[in-house]
Amino acid sequence: MSKPTSTSKAKSRPAPVDPQVQEVNVLRAEVARLQVQLTYEQLRADAYDEMIRVAESGFKISIRKKAVAKR
């Protein structure tokens, strides 16, 4: 039988974190947060479009602005 090495179970200090690695982790977290926010905003925009479509068909009125060239 071999004895367990002192490095496998011994309490040691965590390795110092490189500032660049830490910055990359912060940026990855920010990207993930922004992707979630983008998904939410796209869903919200789709809901508004559907709401306008239903209102236009239900009340037979035009809500959206017409794209007409001004003279």
Image (cartoon, helix red, strand yellow):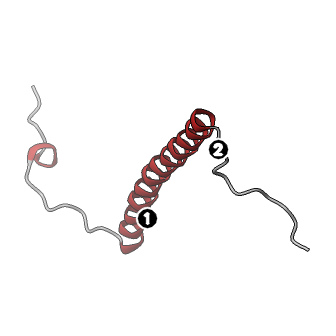
* SS label for mark 2: loop
User: Relative to 55, does residue 11 appear above or below in the rendering?
Assistant: below
* In-front residue for pair 49/15: 49
Mark 1 or 2: in front is 2
Q: Amino acid at mark 2?
A: Ile
Q: Position of residue 25 (x, y in %)?
A: 38, 61
Q: Residues within 10 Å of mark 1 (few under 14, many from 20)?
A: few
Residue at the spot 64% in from the left edge and 38% down from the top edge? 60
CA distance for labels 1 and 2: 47 Å
* SS label for mark 1: helix
The answer to whether 17 appears left or right of 49 in the picture is: left
Quadrant housing the N terminus: top left
Which residue is disc 1 drawn over?
A: 27
Contact, CB < 8 Å: mark 1 with mark 2?
no
User: Relative to 35, does residue 20 appear above or below in the rendering?
Assistant: below
The answer to whether 32 appears left or right of 71 in the picture is: left
Residue 59, quarter of the rendered image: top right
* In-front residue for pair 15/37: 37
Q: Amino acid at mark 1?
A: Leu
Residue at the spot 70% in from the left edge and 57% down from the top edge? 65
Q: Position of residue 23 (x, y in %)?
A: 40, 70
Which residue is disc 2 drawn over?
A: 61
Quadrant housing the C terminus: bottom right
